[in-house]
Image: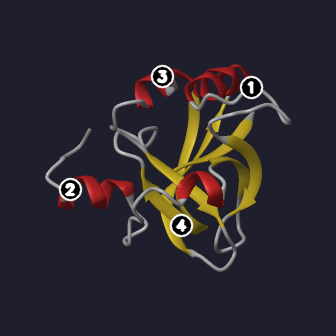
Amino acid sequence: MQTVFVYGTLLQKLNNYYYIQNSVYKIEQGKVKGFLYNTGPYPAIVVDANGMDVVGEWIQVDDAAMSVLDWLEQYEQPGLVNEYERVWVEDAEGKKEGWIYTYSHLQAERYPLIPSGSWREHLLSSGGGQR
């Protein structure tokens, strides 16, 4: 069993959740400190202890789901050129911890910040609805 923090298209009822829905055992609301950016079709987070609260869900998935998540997030392994890096992170309230897929500051700097820290809220406010 693995714990992963999701904050974008993998949230329940959003467009990529179906990739993992049969592997999810538990979902809890959570927040991670960082900055959330709008890359267009999906968000990217930069984990930063001095950042805002980025809203998401802590999901518990079976080990096999990690390879699906790695594929979806274009993460191959440490040291390679990955779109996202997979790193260990703690919940903003310190009660949970697990994996998160994150951008670097350099990758994210060309994208607009999502001030609310919430991809769902961003979709609703931009007229995108529940994708």
The crowding category of the residue bearing disc 2, from other C-alpha atoms within 10 Å (few below 14, some 14 to 19, many at least 20), is few
Residue type, label 1: Glu
The crowding category of the residue bearing disc 4, from other C-alpha atoms within 10 Å (few below 14, some 14 to 19, many at least 20), is many
Q: Which residue is mark 2?
A: 124
Q: List the single residue furthest toward the bottom.
A: 50
Say which element carries label 4: strand
Q: Which residue is mark 3?
A: 19
In the image, taking residue 74 as reference, residue 78 lies left or right, namely right
Q: Which residue is mark 4?
A: 35
In the image, taking residue 69 as reference, residue 126 lies left or right, namely left
Marker disc for residue 76: 1
Residue type, label 3: Tyr
Residue type, label 2: Leu
Classify residue 71 by image quadrant.
Answer: top right
> Are the residues at dot 1 and dot 2 in contact (C-beta closer than 8 Å)?
no
Classify residue 4 by image quadrant.
Answer: top right
